[in-house]
Image: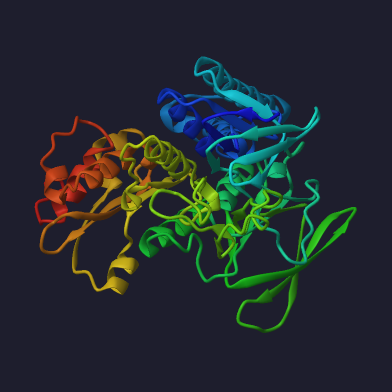
Amino acid sequence: MADKFDLIVIGGGPGGYIAAIRAAQLGMSVACVEKRATLGGTCLNIGCIPSKALLQSSEKFELAKDHLGDHGIEIKSVGLDLAKMLGRKDKIVDGVTKGVEFLFRKNKITWVKGAGTLTGPTEVKVTGAGAEQQLTAPHIIIATGSEVMPLPGVEIDEKTIVSSTGGLALDKVPGHLVVVGGGYIGLEMGSVWRRLGSKVTVVEFLDRITPTMDQEVGKALQRTLAKQGMEFKLSTKVTGAAKSKKGVTLSLEPAAGGAAETLECDIVLAAIGRRPYTAGLGLEALQVAMERGRIKVDGHFRSSVPSIYAIGDVIDGPMLAHKAEEEGVACVEMIAGQHGHVNYDAIPAVIYTAPEVASVGKTEEELKAAGIAYKTGKFPFSANARARANNDSEGFVKVLSDATTDRLLGVHIIGGDAGTMIAELALAMEFGGSAEDVGRTCHAHPTLNEAVKEAALAANGMALNI
């Protein structure tokens, strides 16, 4: 006999576990099906959290090795204990995933361990190490996330040719690391290993890195990373990889056609993107409508089968953990008869390189393509007192507002702690704020956020410190 619940969530990542918690808060009996040994999905286990741990550790290593002397702090020698650094990362992952387990117990959510398959509109079969289980619920949410996009001609073995998973666990610093893909994941992981001593080359098929980013900011990021020592081969296609005892030889071709070449390295990190994880869910048998490999949903996150919902990376939109979380909350609130809401124009995105890059809303290129008249306000961190005191004054804030109403349309930041600063702008955009609203809000001095205030003032020709 099947175990009955009000809601079954398939997937225990950020979207899934947050949806389960919110549903429990609303009085539903909830089961969350997760086949991984720990909760938290890709993000907490092998993505966002471990990568940020290594980014911070590698930043501190580089700071101690190359920059503390600027502060009058003398260190005669700096050594790297990579095993200890990786151990710290693993300890952090263990802590945050156990934190999700605690939240499940606190909210009386049933964690069903195993892989879930839809066997009917309200039925899920769970298979795993134990006996097969049958679950039933009037509402089912698919929150299975995404997986690494394969690169044709390059077979990942997680040893010499690695995905982001293997890139988080290398047992020694590569002499030469080639990152295939100039997006968020590749640039962050490349930054980690460059700081620890690797030569890093980024190979990107397009003519620029971070193609969805505001172009001015993307160019500034590439210049900064190049100054730090990262090398770039743009407009270049990887056609194959040959492994040997010495490492890997990549076969390259110009994206537009031309003479082929080879590139030798110790480790290849394949980071060309991610794709929705929908295999084995039983979607085809139930004739759940799909669009470009993703589950097609309506404004209530409902699929073509009314009892089945989907959120996060398996539906349209950016593959971001916080986007999945917001969708999870909105979805269960609407299931409960409330008015859930996600404003897709106010979802921030962050690249955790150094400097960080953060954005929310439209880019200049998107506004031009849509024929929207806009104003621009910019302010450099070189004119911000706190940034100069931090010896971290590279980058700028760029504010885009409607030419007539001054309503914020997009904000782009490249600079220290940009990922934290962008929240102020996301909040302003969520409530329909204008550039002048932000510019006339009192900001503490001295803070990096004053650059946000000044850029907002600049959109209306009112900047005070430049």
Q: Residue furthest front?
A: 1
Q: Position of residue 142 (x, y in %)?
A: 56, 44
Image label count: 0
Q: Residue furthest right?
A: 245
Task: Tell me where residue 265 sits by quadrant.
Answer: bottom right
Q: Establish if 359 lies above or below 38.
A: below
Q: Establish if 417 lies above or below 219.
A: above
**Could one spot residue 76 in this view of the protein?**
no
- Along the viewing direction, whichever of 101 and 215 lies nearer the viewer: 101
Q: Position of residue 13 (x, y in %)?
A: 57, 36
Tell me the residue at 34%/40% (across/down): 340
**Could one spot residue 217 in this view of the protein?**
yes
Q: Establish if 85 lies above or below 55.
A: above
261 to the left or right of 349: right
Q: Position of residue 187 (x, y in %)?
A: 56, 51
- Along the viewing direction, whichever of 430 and 434 lies nearer the viewer: 430
Q: Quadrant of the N terminus?
A: top right
Tell me the residue at 59%/61% (across/down): 293
Q: Position of residue 176 (x, y in %)?
A: 72, 52
Tell me the residue at 58%/62% (across/down): 232
